[in-house]
Every structure is written in structure tokens, then in C-alpha cells.
Amino acid sequence: MDTRPVRIRVAGPRLTRGGRAVRQRVFCGELGLPDAVLGWDEDGVHVVAIFDEGPTEHVVGAARLMLDDRATGEQVCVDAHFRGQGVGTGLVASLESEALRRGHLEIEVLADALAVPFYRARGYRTVGDPETVHGRSHQRMRRSLCG
């Protein structure tokens, strides 16, 4: 675990590629999901967690916000060495801020069953029954961004 500071920011094209690499390590490498789950990087608003190591920036966490008639947070993930330090919380808070800034009053996630307690602790409530996605149990969850 590395305890040096990590910055959270909306990503441009270069950092979006770094975010995809983190998502690939976590979702495909650790969880064994197919590359197809990563989707298109051109879609949505990408948020990344950046660890500065001297002159080099390393993307150590990533998330994506999809916007249509609702705001949906997707693919929140953090490299193993940076977990448990608030990086995931920072990514989710950034998704929420971006959604609110773009006029959405609520945000939704489809959380892996392992992540449900993480989202519940941040004020998300379950909606509907669990769903199976790529062979894993997920739960749709929502949080109001008003107050």
C-alpha cells in the first residue's frame, strides 16, 4: 500500500488511456472478465486518480460517467496498492460532482455485489433485484445529489 497523495481529475485523451489500462488490470486481470466489458473510451466522462512519482504521472484509479436521460457511474476501480486510502471514494465523489454540474439530480450505479457495502456507506440505496452481468451478481443502486 502506498500512502502518498493521489489527485482526482477529469481525464483528457492521454489520461483516459491510462484509465483504460487500470480498468483492464482490475476487471480483466483480477476479476477475469472479458475485454468487451471495458466498452468504448470515447463514450462518457472519464475520471482518473493520478499518483505523481517525480516527473511521472501514473493513473492508479479510474471511473466513467455515462450521461443520457440519467447519470450512470461505471467501472470504478483502483489499483490494488492504492485501495483502502479513499481513492475510490474520491472517484465516486468526482462522478457525482460532474453529474450534478451537468444538471443531473441523481446518479445510478450497477455495483458488483462485492462493492454494494462501499456504495451503501456513501448514501446509495438499492433499486430492484440483483442482476447477473458477465456471470457476476450486481445490484442497481441510486443516490440523490440534492442535499
Image (cartoon, rainbow, N blue to C red):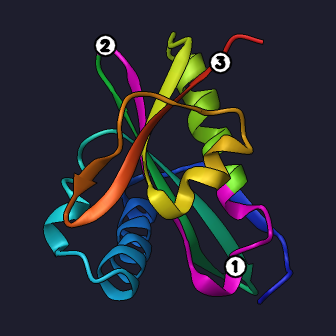
Is 124 situated above or below 6? Answer: above
Snapshot quadrant of residue 23? bottom left
Is 144 situated above or below 4? Answer: above
Q: Position of residue 96 (x, y in %)?
A: 61, 31
The residue to which callout 3 is attached is: 145
Q: Nearer the viewer, residue 6 or 114?
A: 114
Q: Residue furthest front?
A: 129
Q: Is residue 131 magenta?
A: no
Q: Which residues are magenta?
A: 69-88
Label 3: how many residues lie within 10 Å, few (<14), some (14-19) or many (20+)? some
Q: Is residue 73 magenta?
A: yes
Apparent side of residue 76 relative to residue 60 in the rendered image (left or right): left
The residue to which callout 1 is attached is: 82
**Does the rendering let one see residue 114?**
yes
Amino acid on which the number 3 mark rests in the picture? Leu
Check disc 1 and report its element: helix, strand or loop. Answer: helix
- Real-space Cα distance between discs 2 and 1? 33 Å
- Real-space Cα distance between discs 3 and 2? 15 Å
Residue 146 numbered mark, or none: none
Q: Position of residue 62 (x, y in %)?
A: 50, 61
The residue to which callout 2 is attached is: 69
